[in-house]
Image (tube, rainbow, N blue to C red):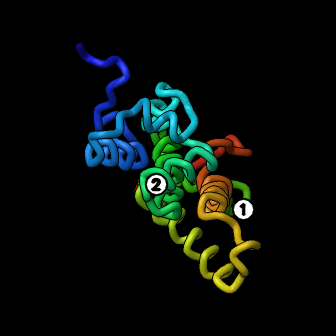
């Protein structure tokens, strides 16, 4: 019998891929058991594995702990997927204002993801001497980096009617 909740790797984000890989490498654990350990429903676990979805911090960290994944890696994959989702069906635009006119320049999703990781790296550098207790979590660092990329560099809202779109 085909399981309707069966996930194919094509449906999964890179984060979801980590979960599938774990289940493949640990045949004694099934999706329902893992969901119970993470403290979410079986359907909920299936949903956060998908490209259209992302786990919250608590769930991401529980999953990382249970499947012995690096929390920083999990945070990175989750937020890269968020940028991928922004780009899904939409061109990402860098928008800047020269005098009266806004200029929109289409940018590749890879560049937005590289920017996310560069900003996260900057946060790690700046906070490297901050005591562990006071330090933001990996997830918080990536979340902040994502917000910066989204707010500072990517835009769909334009203040003026006159816009020049430059294709790269």
Label 1 or label 2, whichever comes before in sequence order: 2
How packed mark 2 is, by other alpha carbons closer than 10 Å (few <14, some 14-19, many 20 or more), is some
For the residues labelled 1 and 2, the Cα–Cα distance comes to 38 Å
In which quarter of the view is residue 1 placed?
Answer: top left
- Asked if disc 1 and disc 2 are in contact, CB closer than 8 Å, the reply is no
Residue beneath disc 1: 99
- The C terminus sits in image quarter: bottom left
Tell me what residue is drawn at x 39 percent, y 33 percent: 31
Q: Is residue 95 visible?
A: no
Q: Nearer the viewer, residue 53 or 148?
A: 53
Residue beneath disc 2: 77
Q: Nearer the viewer, residue 34 or 119?
A: 34
How packed mark 1 is, by other alpha carbons closer than 10 Å (few <14, some 14-19, many 20 or more), is few
State left or right for residue 45 relative to residue 142.
left
What x and y, as percent, mark residue 53? 51, 36
Q: In this view, which residue lies farthest toward the right? A: 134
What x and y, as percent, mark residue 152? 66, 59
Q: Nearer the viewer, residue 86 or 79?
A: 79
Q: Nearer the viewer, residue 114 or 165?
A: 114
What x and y, as percent, mark residue 126? 67, 81
Tell me what residue is drawn at x 58 percent, y 68 percent: 120
Tell me what residue is drawn at x 26 percent, y 48 percent: 25
In which quarter of the view is residue 121 placed?
Answer: bottom right
Q: In this view, which residue lies farthest toward the bottom? A: 129
Label placed on residue 68: none
**Label 1: element kind:** loop
Q: Is residue 137 above or below residue 19?
A: below
Q: Is residue 36 visible?
A: yes
State left or right for residue 97 relative to residue 34.
right
Tell me what residue is drawn at x 68 percent, y 86 percent: 129
**Label 2: element kind:** helix
């Amino acid at each position: 019998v085909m399981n309707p909740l069966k996930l194919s790797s094509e449906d999964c984000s890179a984060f979801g891929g980590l979960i599938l890989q774990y289940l493949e490498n640990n045949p004694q654990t099934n999706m329902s058991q893992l969901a119970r350990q993470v403290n979410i429903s079986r359907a909920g676990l299936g949903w956060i594995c998908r490209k259209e979805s992302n786990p919250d911090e608590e769930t991401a960290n529980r999953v990382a702990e249970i499947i012995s994944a690096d929390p920083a890696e999990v945070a990175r994959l989750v937020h890269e997927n968020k940028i991928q989702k922004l780009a899904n069906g939409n061109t990402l635009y860098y928008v800047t204002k020269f005098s009266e006119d806004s200029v929109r320049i289409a940018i590749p999703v890879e560049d937005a993801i590289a920017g996310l990781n560069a900003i996260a790296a900057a946060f790690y550098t700046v906070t490297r001497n901050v005591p562990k207790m006071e330090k933001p979590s990996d997830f918080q660092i990536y979340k902040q980096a994502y917000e910066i990329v989204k707010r500072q560099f990517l835009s769909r809202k334009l203040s003026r009617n006159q816009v020049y779109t430059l294709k790269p």
